Amino acid sequence: MSVAPTAVSPREVDARTWGAILLRAGVVREEDTTLAGPIRVLVFDGEHWVQEQAPDGRLLLRRFDDRAAADAFVDRRLETYDRMWDGCGCKIDYDEP
């Protein structure tokens, strides 16, 4: 099974594919968003990916060039979730590239 990078990001995966990825991937960071399930940084076949779940239940993967870029993405997401708790009215675009 291959989860090669695509021109379209994020890549949606079904539960079966996600289970297979988890068997092979190393989870190097996992944070609880408290609003949308965990967000994870994975190393899979030598590549860095971020997995998150949209409120509609879609499992999404995004490929990053390195761990620092993946961590920066997660940090931005967590900052937005924190602001959402404060009632900022902001929303996350889960389909953003």
Image: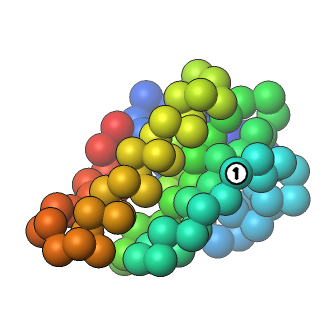
Where residue 40 appears, x then y in whole percent? 63, 55
Horizontal side of residue 55 vs 24, given as left or right = left
Residue 87 placed where, x, y %? 17, 74
What residue appears at the point 81 percent right and 34 percent down from the top-left corner? 45
Q: Which residue is mark 1?
A: 29
**Which scheme is used to colour this image of the protein?**
rainbow
In this view, 26 is above or below 31: above
Q: Secondary structure at mark 1?
A: strand
- Residue 46 percent coordinates (x, y): 79, 29
Looking at this view, is 52 or 4 the one in front? Answer: 52
Mark 1 closeness class: few <14, some 14–19, many ≥20 residues within 10 Å: some
Q: Is 8 left or right of 87, judged from the image as shown?
A: right
- Compared with 94, 2 (above or below) is above
Along the viewing direction, whichever of 14 and 76 lies nearer the viewer? 76
Indicate the position of residue 62 as horizontal and vertical percent values.
Answer: 52, 42
Relative side of 37 to 35, left or right: right
Rendered residue at 77%/52% (across/down): 27
Quadrant location of the C terminus in the rendered image:
top left
Quadrant in which residue 20 is drawn: bottom right
Identify which residue, 43 or 67, lies in the foreground. 67
For residue 24, side relative to residue 53 (left or right)? right
**Amino acid type assigned to the residue bearing label 1 in the image:** Arg
Q: State the residue lying farthest toward the front.
A: 86
Q: Residue at x 36, y 54 (%)?
A: 79
